[in-house]
Amino acid sequence: MDSATTPFDALPGKPCAIDCRDVTFPYELHPSFSSPLADIVLCASDGVTYRMSSYTLRLASGFFRDLFSLPQPITLPEKVYLGSPPGSGKGIEELFTTCESSDVLTPFLMLIGGIPIHTPLHEWGVVFSYKTSYFTDESTDPRSCFDIIERVLRLAECWDAPGPLSYIRLGLHNPELVKRDPLRLYAIASHFGWECERNWAAQHTLMLDLSQASPAAQETLECMSSKDLLSLLKLHYRRREEFRELLDEPGRFSVGNSDETLCPRCNETPLDNSTWIALKAAMVMEMERRPLGDSIVGFEVDGIGGENFAGVLTWPEADACFKATCTKEGCGGLNYDICATLKQIAWCVDSLSLDL
């Protein structure tokens, strides 16, 4: 998959080649990575250091496996004393600096090192406190968790570490996470080819009007590959057109879609279908604005959406349609059966495809 057009390339701090440097004592060790048996020290860009076993790094990361398999120079690189004062003969490790900050490197190393993270993905905030090993969200933006998730995934992809990728993939199927930003979730799943998560996120984007996207959503859309964006747009377009075709079926809405229908009460006067035509147009426009259709039926669709919507009954077009009566003097029969019509509309919405 071409990653040149994915959101990952827009993120700063892409991991560069690791080099060895001489750093002066003392150091600030991460408390969860302070084993004296470790032989490698990784240093984050903000100065937090991590003692790691080269065996763990080699086992969990293809990048380090290749790095440690390269021929070593005759003259050993500089060593660093970490945790013991120089001259003590203890705590000698090889130091590698990285371009990643501790809020990304900490969860990444916890995942490859088998240290449990008890915080769900939607609570992965902008700041990961290396002193407590817990996420502390200092941002008011509920989408900030995606910044950490994307950077950890990018680091795992760059360092060829399948463990963090699998862990995060399992956590993506999170109702709170998809509620915060289904577009970002769709972009992540599309980048890695995770079809189940990709399809699930795409279904939740049906609550969004992509033509009126917010600046943050527009940025996400611009970073998607053309293939992934086209798949998403086709899903939104297909639901609207399928809904339009179902509403126009004369067999399903025989009274409103026929020009020869007579009043069901007097069976003499031809019905005026103008109110039904106006209601259909309003429903199609609403389906374009919110392709999920929950705002039309007034309840959730396949377990998605349904919040704070009363459905078409509150619309002026529906009020005019269901109050329309026969024009014959003395008849006054209603043109449309409100219960039967609403039942058929709900069936039309439920029958629309949700898959890409």
Image: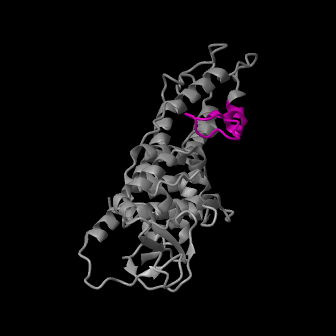
- From the viewer's side, name the closer residue of 89 and 356: 89
Q: Name the residue at 49% across, 30% down.
A: 351
Tell me if 214 is positioned left or right of 99 in this view: right
User: Where's the N terminus, which quadrant?
Assistant: bottom left
Q: How many marks?
A: 0
Percent position (x, y) of residue 151?
48, 64
Q: In this image, 253 relative to 320: left or right?
A: left
Image location of residue 164, percent across then percent down:
44, 55
Regarding residue 94, the answer to whether it shows in the image is yes
Instruction: Inspect the magenta stretch and tell me whether residue 253 lies in it.
Output: no
- Magenta span: predominant SS is loop
Indicate yes or no whether the magenta region holds residue 306: yes
The one nearer the camera, 271 or 300, is 300
Of the pair 126 and 240, the residue shown nearer to us: 126
Tell me which residue sits at (62%, 60%) in the image: 135
Q: Which residues, given as a range, are shown in magenta?
A: 297-321
Position of 134 relative to 307 (above/below): below
Placement of 142 over or under 284, stated as above or below: below
Q: Say left or right for 271 vs 18.
A: right
* Relative to 118, 243 lies left or right: left
